Amino acid sequence: MSNNHKQLVIGAGFVGLGIAQALKEAGIPYDWVDASDNIGGNWYHGVYETAHIISSRKVTEFTHFPMSKDYPDFPSAQQMWDYLNMFAEHFDLKSQIELNRTVSYVRPIENNLWEVTFANGERRIYKGVIMCNGHHWCRRFPKFEGEFAGEIIHSKDYKKPEQLRGKRVLVIGGGNSACDIASEAARVADKSVLSLRNSVWFLPKSFAGVPLVNIIQGWMPEWFQRWLAYSIIRLTFGKHERYGLPKPNYRIFEKHPTLNNEVPYYIQHGRIIPKPAVNKLDGRWVEFCDRTREEFDLIVCATGYYVAYPFLPPELQRVKGATVQCYGGSFLADYKGLSYIGWGQVRGGVGSIMSAYAPIFARLLKLQNEINIPLGLVFREMGQSLPKTHLSDPHQTFRQLKFLNLFFGFLVKKARQIDKRYPEHQNQPLPYPQNREDKMLITIK
């Protein structure tokens, strides 16, 4: 089926919804698919039932569609999914989406077009493909020495407290999910141990009754943001050493922040036992790097996710670590029509960022229609470098987007000038692999 005048949006989570709404607003034709049976992405199928957002309602909501005033500062997973459904209904987006549609392969073909193959064997041709398939689904597990006689799961597989009740639980990881699950285990499990390969900075979710992300403002330089965060930590928790934790060996904001008040609280009450990294497994016993041993029934690996695009050919696998090697946050310099969206982690809420970025992205797609070369090549020729990290300061991102919006006319002018330098550009077509088996089909949610 040919849809060579359309874009294809993959994924209907927070990012996919924001992009779809912006495309509709801009009058850009698109198809939209998701492998799940409903919209909402991670908030529909991926989080545990007791989860709450760590950023505040104010920065998480779409700016042009505020959450209900009845919502708390930190809405629950159910409230977030309800909100995303209200967003979709308000902008009449649901009629556009095809659910239970798994993408199995995406490849460039002649005339700068893209062939998309679905799990049922159907193939379609599109002008471009916008990948919003998220980064909280491709589980990353640590490698262990030895064997464990109990159960090992990933935090993605944790859904409710009953999975922990009455068990001796080891949680591995220092991120927000790890700390939430360790705190839940402190309430319902027989034992809760939190294994940290490296100590993390614990930031409170609120200070003086105000969500922390609302306190740090855009006018503050980064050094002042760090100083303010350090001061709040010291006033709230004191030194990490007081909890039996070594001082973290990195500066605040160099890693994705861990906002959690409960772990220090439960450590002080003896309900969470902090331990260093796991050394080896031995039946029901786990030996840690400090040579201490503990007995467990369940290990929860809250060890993060890979940024993955399994439906792309090797030539388009541009992920380095957790960072996609693209320009303008989304575009390649050598292929036109492929967009990587939502792979980064912003220090704050995704809704406000998407509200600012999605309309600009729609303008960029219209510009892409006017030139022959990839937008990534335009950004590269204008001096932009490839990203070195997947983390971003939201305030800096807002400033960059505001600058781009103000000087979009200049970008258009430069893009047309650069386009003239490469009159022969064409995407390099790639063949469909003959031996691609069904087992390679991975559900993208």
Image (spheres, helix red, strand yellow):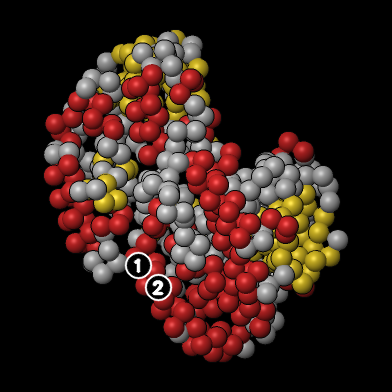
Question: Is 427 drawn above or below residue 224 in the view shown?
Answer: below
Q: Which residue is mark 2?
A: 400
Judged left or right of residue 7, residue 327 is left
Residue 316: image x %, image y %? Answer: 62, 57
**Amino acid type, callout 1:** Gln
Residue 337: image x %, image y %? Answer: 66, 68
Name the residue: 27% across, 63% down.
Answer: 217
Residue 272: image x %, image y %? Answer: 28, 23
Q: Neighbour class for label 2 at 10 Å: few (<14), some, many (≥20)?
A: few
Specify the quadrant of the image occupied by residue 298.
Answer: top left
Question: Is 79 drawn above or below residue 386 in the view shown?
Answer: above
Specify the quadrant of the image occupied by residue 261.
Answer: top left
Extreme residue toward the front, this view: 70
Do labels 1 and 2 touch, CB within 8 Å?
A: yes
* Tag 1 secondary structure: helix
Name the residue: 38% across, 26% down.
Answer: 184
Q: Which residue is mark 1?
A: 396
Q: Neighbour class for label 1 at 10 Å: few (<14), some, many (≥20)?
A: some
